[in-house]
Amino acid sequence: MDKFVINGGKKLNGSVNVSGAKNATLALLPASLLANGISEFRNTPKLNDVFTMLKLLKQLGAGYTFENGIVTLDTTLVDNFTAPYEHVKKMRASVYVLGPLLARYGEARVSLPGGCAWGPRPVNLHLEGLKRLGAEINLEDGYIIAKSKRLNGGKINFDIPSVGATGNIMMAACLAKGETIINNAAMEPEITNLARYLISMGAKIEGLNSSILHIQGVDFLNPANIDTIPDRIEAGTLLIAGAITKGKVNLTNVDIRHMYSLCEKLEATGVKLSYNSNSVTIDATDSELNSVDVITGPFPGYPTDMQAQWIVYMSVCNGTATITDTIYRDRFTHVPELTRLGADITVKDNSAIVKGTNKLRGAKVMSTDLRASASLVLGGLAAEGTTEVLRIYHLDRGYEGLESKLGQLGASIERVAGSEY
Ligand code: EPZ
């Protein structure tokens, strides 16, 4: 298992390009199952989760190429409709094949995802939504067995604006007979990117960027090409790298419209931000960094995927900050590891209270999940001395070449392959 060795305390300085969005790609690739033929996905990030999804689609019978950031997916020979446990357990987003397989082939057998490092990850909203479209859904031996001759449009109201459920139901509704209305739909940019791909395939979807989607079903869809949006979570993580080291970092290939909540919070801590539509610069070189509270929420609120990164940033700011996660109440497995770096954090219910200390000190720390590992890297960048971040296979799921991007900005960070501890 690889680790990072980081010599901290260096101000980051320079410019890097942000990769395509993992959470857009993981919805776009399975959507190709709705049509017969070859679709092209540009600006696709080279991530372990992307390869996991491609391997799953291959197992269903699809063929793919992946070169220079472009994925082509050929669904002509898809003839298997089972997403097995070993895939879904590894990556919950595998459940995105459920809607397309059911809508296009009339059947799907998808393992239940189980839980993750910070608790259960239910799919009840996915299943209730598909039932509203007329699907027959049964659970057998840990698998979702879904069947339907032809889905029929329906009215669906989500108690929670679930990203995954919105994606799955939107994809299924595109081939249903009649109109589907999804009320309280997720408005994440990744869902809008998916909707744009579906529309380019011939789908009829209205209400993009809103919480009410109207989908008129069609009889078939055609393959299409799509540009993947920039990864707003990678961009946010790199901005905090600039802030926590009191450096000056410029990011290119961002969509600033996807980052307003984070940018507002960063400016409130005292850093200077300047941006245009596709680039952003953070300058913390002579800022007094002040603690700022955060409450996570559905887009356009502050993203839960940036919660761990905010906690470690607050650990070096002046004052006390409270970070509350309303999306995942238990997403705090990074806290015990951050305290090993000297952070002063108390978790109470679904909030972390962070008392800013003026210095973190390097230590060996263990990654527990994707965004937790990112927060440990950020802590290592700020800490005095050497930090070893273990089990960075978690990080490799969602960050493309993070160590080379940080190295480009002047960080001293090295990947040590195959080390146990
Ligand atoms: C997506 O997960 C993202 N993953 C997550 O990013 C992100 O944290 C999450 O959205 C919230 O923004 C991908 O896009 C691949 P949800 P998803 O359904 O779709 C509850 C990362 O780090 N819920 O919006 O699984 C659920 O328990 C990952 O990149 C139900 O109760 O999230 C949670 O509390 C981590 N029943 C809330 O809704 C359901 O059927 C939001 O979950 C579905 C969800």
Image (cartoon, rainbow, N blue to C red):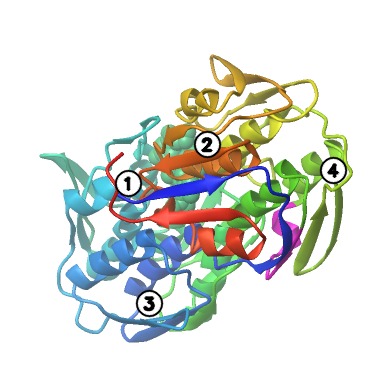
The answer to which of marks 3 and 1 sits earlier in the sequence is: 1
Label 2 to label 4, Cα distance in Å?
Answer: 30 Å
Against 368, residue 257 (above or below) is below
x%, y% of residue 17?
Answer: 64, 70
**Mark 1 = which residue?**
131
Q: Nearer the viewer, residue 160 or 409?
A: 409
Q: Nearer the viewer, residue 56 or 269?
A: 269
Q: Alpha-carbon neighbours of circle 1 within 10 Å: few (<14), some, or many (≥20)?
A: some
Assign a secondary structure to mark 4: helix
Label 3 to label 2, Cα distance in Å?
Answer: 30 Å
Q: Does any portion of residue 161 appear in the rendered image?
A: no
Dot label at residue 219: 3
**Mark 4 = which residue?**
267
The answer to whether the residue labelled 3 contacts the one labelled 2, judged by CB atoms less than 8 Å apart, is no
Q: Does any portion of residue 153 appear in the rendered image?
A: yes
Q: Which residues are magenta?
A: 249-259
Assign a secondary structure to mark 1: helix
Membership of 368 in magenta stretch? no
Label 1 to label 4, Cα distance in Å?
Answer: 45 Å
The amino acid on which the numbered mark 2 sits, given as a three-letter code, is Ile
The answer to which of marks 2 and 4 sits earlier in the sequence is: 2
